Amino acid sequence: MSLYPNMRQVRAFVSVAETSSFTKAAQLMNLTQSAISHSIKSLEEQLGVCLIERAGKRLSITQDGNIYLARCRKVIHELDVAQQELTNLKQWSQGRIRIGATHSMVKYLLPAILREFRECFPRCEVVVETGDSATLIEKLNAAEIDYAFGMKTKHPSWCEYERLFSDEMGLVISSAHPWASATKIPSEGLSQDDFLVYGKSSETYRLIREQVERLGIKLRVSMNLDDMEAIKEMAKIGLGVGIVAPWVARRELESGELKFVKCDGIDIKRDWGVFYHDIKKKNLAEATFLGISRLVCAGVSTLPT
Protein backbone atom coordinates (compact mmCIF):
# COMPACT_ATOMS: atom_id res chain seq x y z
CA MET A 1 0.00 0.00 0.00
CA SER A 2 1.23 3.50 -0.84
CA LEU A 3 2.58 5.55 2.06
CA TYR A 4 0.63 8.61 0.90
CA PRO A 5 -2.93 8.90 -0.44
CA ASN A 6 -3.41 9.87 -4.06
CA MET A 7 -4.75 13.31 -5.00
CA ARG A 8 -8.08 11.87 -6.17
CA GLN A 9 -8.72 10.62 -2.64
CA VAL A 10 -7.65 13.92 -1.10
CA ARG A 11 -9.79 16.02 -3.44
CA ALA A 12 -12.77 13.71 -2.92
CA PHE A 13 -12.48 14.12 0.85
CA VAL A 14 -12.20 17.92 0.65
CA SER A 15 -15.12 18.15 -1.76
CA VAL A 16 -17.36 16.04 0.48
CA ALA A 17 -16.33 18.05 3.54
CA GLU A 18 -17.02 21.38 1.82
CA THR A 19 -20.34 20.40 0.23
CA SER A 20 -21.56 18.05 3.02
CA SER A 21 -22.76 15.81 0.22
CA PHE A 22 -21.40 12.82 -1.70
CA THR A 23 -23.72 13.70 -4.58
CA LYS A 24 -22.53 17.32 -4.90
CA ALA A 25 -18.91 16.24 -4.52
CA ALA A 26 -19.38 13.74 -7.33
CA GLN A 27 -20.83 16.47 -9.55
CA LEU A 28 -17.93 18.85 -8.80
CA MET A 29 -15.37 16.19 -9.64
CA ASN A 30 -17.30 14.79 -12.60
CA LEU A 31 -17.34 11.34 -11.02
CA THR A 32 -20.00 8.92 -9.87
CA GLN A 33 -21.20 8.95 -6.28
CA SER A 34 -19.92 5.41 -5.80
CA ALA A 35 -16.47 6.48 -6.96
CA ILE A 36 -16.44 9.26 -4.35
CA SER A 37 -17.60 6.85 -1.64
CA HIS A 38 -14.92 4.35 -2.63
CA SER A 39 -12.21 7.03 -2.52
CA ILE A 40 -13.22 8.16 0.97
CA LYS A 41 -13.43 4.57 2.24
CA SER A 42 -10.00 3.75 0.80
CA LEU A 43 -8.55 6.90 2.35
CA GLU A 44 -9.96 6.06 5.79
CA GLU A 45 -8.61 2.52 5.59
CA GLN A 46 -5.20 3.78 4.57
CA LEU A 47 -5.08 6.31 7.41
CA GLY A 48 -6.67 3.99 9.94
CA VAL A 49 -9.14 6.63 11.14
CA CYS A 50 -12.72 7.67 10.47
CA LEU A 51 -12.91 10.98 8.64
CA ILE A 52 -16.63 11.29 7.98
CA GLU A 53 -19.53 10.02 10.09
CA ARG A 54 -22.68 9.11 8.21
CA ALA A 55 -26.13 9.24 9.84
CA GLY A 56 -28.65 8.63 7.11
CA LYS A 57 -28.33 11.51 4.65
CA ARG A 58 -26.48 13.67 7.15
CA LEU A 59 -22.70 13.89 7.21
CA SER A 60 -20.34 15.25 9.84
CA ILE A 61 -16.59 15.57 9.92
CA THR A 62 -14.88 13.81 12.81
CA GLN A 63 -12.18 15.37 14.96
CA ASP A 64 -9.58 13.38 13.02
CA GLY A 65 -11.27 14.50 9.83
CA ASN A 66 -11.04 18.20 10.74
CA ILE A 67 -7.33 17.89 11.50
CA TYR A 68 -6.71 16.13 8.21
CA LEU A 69 -8.97 18.51 6.28
CA ALA A 70 -6.92 21.57 7.25
CA ARG A 71 -3.75 19.96 5.91
CA CYS A 72 -5.42 18.72 2.74
CA ARG A 73 -6.69 22.20 1.93
CA LYS A 74 -3.15 23.57 2.20
CA VAL A 75 -1.79 20.83 -0.07
CA ILE A 76 -4.46 21.47 -2.70
CA HIS A 77 -3.90 25.23 -2.49
CA GLU A 78 -0.15 24.84 -3.01
CA LEU A 79 -0.68 22.51 -5.97
CA ASP A 80 -3.16 24.94 -7.52
CA VAL A 81 -0.72 27.81 -7.08
CA ALA A 82 2.08 25.73 -8.63
CA GLN A 83 -0.15 24.86 -11.57
CA GLN A 84 -0.99 28.52 -12.12
CA GLU A 85 2.68 29.50 -11.98
CA LEU A 86 3.53 26.85 -14.57
CA THR A 87 0.69 28.09 -16.76
CA ASN A 88 1.99 31.66 -16.48
CA LEU A 89 5.49 30.50 -17.31
CA LYS A 90 4.26 28.62 -20.36
CA GLN A 91 1.90 31.27 -21.67
CA TRP A 92 3.41 34.57 -20.57
CA SER A 93 6.89 33.47 -19.49
CA GLN A 94 7.13 35.34 -16.23
CA GLY A 95 10.21 33.23 -15.69
CA ARG A 96 13.79 33.19 -16.88
CA ILE A 97 15.78 32.77 -20.08
CA ARG A 98 19.46 31.89 -19.76
CA ILE A 99 21.48 33.15 -22.71
CA GLY A 100 25.09 32.49 -23.60
CA ALA A 101 26.73 34.72 -26.21
CA THR A 102 30.16 35.62 -27.50
CA HIS A 103 31.66 38.91 -26.34
CA SER A 104 31.07 40.59 -29.71
CA MET A 105 27.39 39.62 -29.81
CA VAL A 106 26.88 40.75 -26.21
CA LYS A 107 28.54 44.08 -26.98
CA TYR A 108 27.06 44.96 -30.37
CA LEU A 109 23.85 42.97 -30.95
CA LEU A 110 22.37 41.76 -27.67
CA PRO A 111 21.44 45.23 -26.30
CA ALA A 112 19.08 45.85 -29.24
CA ILE A 113 17.54 42.39 -28.84
CA LEU A 114 17.03 42.84 -25.10
CA ARG A 115 15.52 46.29 -25.53
CA GLU A 116 12.81 44.93 -27.84
CA PHE A 117 12.27 41.82 -25.72
CA ARG A 118 11.77 43.83 -22.51
CA GLU A 119 8.89 45.67 -24.12
CA CYS A 120 7.14 42.35 -24.80
CA PHE A 121 8.04 40.53 -21.56
CA PRO A 122 8.99 43.05 -18.86
CA ARG A 123 8.67 40.44 -16.09
CA CYS A 124 10.87 37.81 -17.69
CA GLU A 125 14.39 37.61 -16.26
CA VAL A 126 17.20 37.27 -18.79
CA VAL A 127 20.51 35.86 -17.53
CA VAL A 128 23.51 36.37 -19.83
CA GLU A 129 26.88 34.58 -19.83
CA THR A 130 29.77 35.22 -22.20
CA GLY A 131 32.32 32.90 -23.78
CA ASP A 132 33.44 31.50 -27.10
CA SER A 133 31.15 29.20 -29.06
CA ALA A 134 32.82 25.98 -27.92
CA THR A 135 32.60 26.96 -24.25
CA LEU A 136 28.97 27.99 -24.61
CA ILE A 137 28.06 24.64 -26.20
CA GLU A 138 29.60 22.91 -23.18
CA LYS A 139 27.43 25.04 -20.90
CA LEU A 140 24.44 24.17 -23.05
CA ASN A 141 25.15 20.47 -22.59
CA ALA A 142 25.48 20.97 -18.84
CA ALA A 143 22.07 22.71 -18.79
CA GLU A 144 23.68 25.90 -17.46
CA ILE A 145 22.18 27.97 -20.30
CA ASP A 146 19.16 27.54 -22.59
CA TYR A 147 20.51 29.10 -25.80
CA ALA A 148 24.01 29.85 -27.08
CA PHE A 149 24.60 32.65 -29.60
CA GLY A 150 27.89 32.54 -31.42
CA MET A 151 29.92 31.75 -34.50
CA LYS A 152 29.19 28.47 -36.21
CA THR A 153 31.63 25.77 -35.20
CA LYS A 154 31.73 22.00 -34.96
CA HIS A 155 29.01 20.87 -32.60
CA PRO A 156 27.73 17.52 -31.27
CA SER A 157 24.77 15.72 -32.83
CA TRP A 158 22.40 16.63 -29.99
CA CYS A 159 23.01 20.33 -30.62
CA GLU A 160 20.72 22.14 -33.06
CA TYR A 161 22.05 25.17 -34.93
CA GLU A 162 20.03 27.95 -36.58
CA ARG A 163 21.87 30.45 -38.76
CA LEU A 164 21.12 34.13 -38.03
CA PHE A 165 23.54 35.99 -40.33
CA SER A 166 26.87 35.84 -42.15
CA ASP A 167 29.69 38.35 -42.25
CA GLU A 168 32.94 38.96 -44.07
CA MET A 169 35.98 40.27 -42.27
CA GLY A 170 38.26 42.97 -43.60
CA LEU A 171 40.73 45.61 -42.52
CA VAL A 172 39.79 48.68 -40.50
CA ILE A 173 42.20 51.57 -40.65
CA SER A 174 42.47 55.21 -39.69
CA SER A 175 41.06 57.70 -42.17
CA ALA A 176 44.62 59.07 -42.38
CA HIS A 177 46.16 55.72 -43.30
CA PRO A 178 47.80 55.44 -46.77
CA TRP A 179 45.31 52.67 -47.64
CA ALA A 180 42.29 54.82 -46.77
CA SER A 181 41.55 55.80 -50.38
CA ALA A 182 41.66 52.19 -51.61
CA THR A 183 38.82 49.67 -51.62
CA LYS A 184 41.15 46.71 -51.90
CA ILE A 185 44.87 46.29 -51.29
CA PRO A 186 47.30 43.67 -52.68
CA SER A 187 48.09 40.79 -50.32
CA GLU A 188 51.78 41.71 -50.16
CA GLY A 189 50.75 44.89 -48.41
CA LEU A 190 49.89 42.83 -45.33
CA SER A 191 53.57 42.47 -44.50
CA GLN A 192 54.11 46.22 -44.49
CA ASP A 193 52.09 47.23 -41.44
CA ASP A 194 51.46 46.31 -37.83
CA PHE A 195 48.28 44.42 -37.03
CA LEU A 196 45.90 44.49 -34.10
CA VAL A 197 44.41 41.02 -33.60
CA TYR A 198 41.60 39.72 -31.44
CA GLY A 199 42.47 36.91 -29.03
CA LYS A 200 45.07 34.53 -30.43
CA SER A 201 43.13 31.64 -28.88
CA SER A 202 39.90 32.60 -30.63
CA GLU A 203 38.31 30.89 -33.62
CA THR A 204 38.40 34.20 -35.49
CA TYR A 205 42.18 34.48 -35.16
CA ARG A 206 42.55 30.87 -36.33
CA LEU A 207 40.63 31.73 -39.51
CA ILE A 208 42.77 34.83 -40.08
CA ARG A 209 46.02 32.92 -39.55
CA GLU A 210 44.98 30.17 -41.96
CA GLN A 211 44.16 32.69 -44.70
CA VAL A 212 47.39 34.63 -44.29
CA GLU A 213 49.60 31.54 -44.07
CA ARG A 214 48.01 30.22 -47.26
CA LEU A 215 49.33 33.35 -48.98
CA GLY A 216 52.80 32.75 -47.54
CA ILE A 217 52.65 35.93 -45.47
CA LYS A 218 53.40 36.40 -41.80
CA LEU A 219 51.45 39.11 -39.99
CA ARG A 220 53.37 41.56 -37.86
CA VAL A 221 51.16 41.39 -34.78
CA SER A 222 51.86 44.45 -32.66
CA MET A 223 49.01 43.93 -30.20
CA ASN A 224 46.96 40.92 -29.16
CA LEU A 225 43.77 42.30 -27.61
CA ASP A 226 40.67 40.69 -26.15
CA ASP A 227 38.49 43.75 -26.67
CA MET A 228 37.14 44.91 -30.03
CA GLU A 229 36.72 48.43 -28.66
CA ALA A 230 40.44 48.57 -27.91
CA ILE A 231 41.27 47.34 -31.42
CA LYS A 232 39.10 50.07 -32.98
CA GLU A 233 40.56 52.80 -30.76
CA MET A 234 44.13 51.75 -31.59
CA ALA A 235 43.30 51.66 -35.30
CA LYS A 236 41.71 55.14 -35.18
CA ILE A 237 44.91 56.72 -33.90
CA GLY A 238 47.07 54.85 -36.39
CA LEU A 239 48.73 52.32 -34.08
CA GLY A 240 47.94 49.41 -36.38
CA VAL A 241 45.45 47.73 -38.69
CA GLY A 242 42.50 45.93 -37.19
CA ILE A 243 40.84 42.90 -38.74
CA VAL A 244 37.12 42.99 -37.97
CA ALA A 245 33.67 42.60 -39.52
CA PRO A 246 31.72 45.76 -40.50
CA TRP A 247 28.94 45.23 -37.93
CA VAL A 248 31.48 45.46 -35.11
CA ALA A 249 32.60 48.90 -36.33
CA ARG A 250 29.28 50.19 -37.68
CA ARG A 251 29.33 53.47 -35.75
CA GLU A 252 32.96 54.31 -36.60
CA LEU A 253 32.52 53.42 -40.29
CA GLU A 254 29.39 55.55 -40.58
CA SER A 255 31.11 58.52 -38.89
CA GLY A 256 34.23 58.17 -41.05
CA GLU A 257 36.55 57.61 -38.08
CA LEU A 258 37.54 54.27 -39.61
CA LYS A 259 37.76 52.97 -43.15
CA PHE A 260 36.98 49.40 -44.22
CA VAL A 261 39.10 47.83 -46.97
CA LYS A 262 39.52 44.35 -48.33
CA CYS A 263 42.68 42.52 -49.25
CA ASP A 264 43.32 40.35 -52.32
CA GLY A 265 43.40 36.69 -51.40
CA ILE A 266 41.77 37.21 -48.02
CA ASP A 267 38.26 35.80 -47.88
CA ILE A 268 37.20 35.33 -44.27
CA LYS A 269 33.47 34.62 -44.11
CA ARG A 270 31.75 33.46 -40.97
CA ASP A 271 28.30 32.20 -40.06
CA TRP A 272 26.66 33.27 -36.81
CA GLY A 273 23.63 31.71 -35.19
CA VAL A 274 22.02 30.18 -32.15
CA PHE A 275 22.63 26.73 -30.68
CA TYR A 276 20.19 24.82 -28.49
CA HIS A 277 19.51 21.26 -27.36
CA ASP A 278 17.56 19.16 -29.86
CA ILE A 279 14.99 18.22 -27.19
CA LYS A 280 14.41 21.86 -26.23
CA LYS A 281 10.77 22.96 -26.26
CA LYS A 282 10.41 26.71 -26.65
CA ASN A 283 7.85 28.62 -24.60
CA LEU A 284 6.25 31.84 -25.82
CA ALA A 285 8.94 34.14 -24.41
CA GLU A 286 11.78 32.05 -25.83
CA ALA A 287 10.14 31.91 -29.25
CA THR A 288 9.69 35.70 -29.12
CA PHE A 289 13.32 36.22 -28.07
CA LEU A 290 14.54 34.16 -31.03
CA GLY A 291 12.18 36.01 -33.37
CA ILE A 292 13.53 39.38 -32.24
CA SER A 293 17.08 38.02 -32.62
CA ARG A 294 16.36 37.12 -36.25
CA LEU A 295 15.04 40.60 -36.98
CA VAL A 296 17.99 42.39 -35.34
CA CYS A 297 20.55 40.11 -36.96
CA ALA A 298 18.93 40.50 -40.38
CA GLY A 299 20.23 44.08 -40.32
CA VAL A 300 23.79 42.81 -39.97
CA SER A 301 23.68 41.12 -43.36
CA THR A 302 22.64 44.37 -45.02
CA LEU A 303 25.78 46.26 -43.94
CA PRO A 304 28.21 47.07 -46.74
CA THR A 305 31.38 44.97 -46.90
Image (cartoon, rainbow, N blue to C red):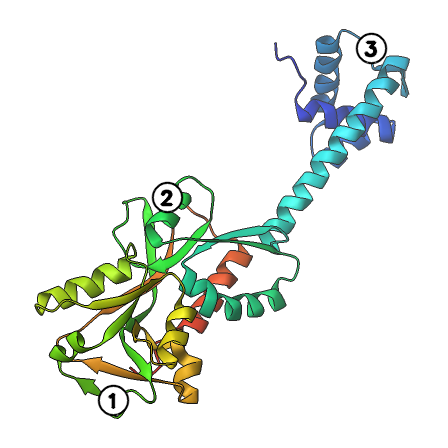
Three-letter amino acid code at disc 2?
Answer: Glu
Residue 33 visible at all: no
Residue 234 placement (x, y as % from top left) = 38, 74
Task: Tell how many labels.
Answer: 3
Contact flag, marks 3 and 2 (Cβ < 8 Å): no
Q: Nearer the viewer's eye, disc 1 or disc 3?
A: 1
Residue that badge 1 annotates: 178
Sequence-first tag of 1 and 2: 2
Marks 1 & 3, CB-CB < 8 Å contact: no
Q: Pointer 3: what residue?
A: 50
Circle 3 crowding by C-alpha within 10 Å: few under 14, some 14–19, many from 20: some
> Camera-side residue: 64 or 242?
242
The x and y percentages for residue 150 are: 36, 59
Q: Is 29 in front, or is 174? A: 174
Q: CA distance from mark 1 to mark 2?
A: 44 Å
Q: Which residue is mark 2?
A: 138
Which is more foreground, mark 1 or mark 2?
1
**Distance between mark 3 and mark 2 Cα atoms:** 56 Å
Percent from the top left, x then y, of residue 57? Answer: 89, 20
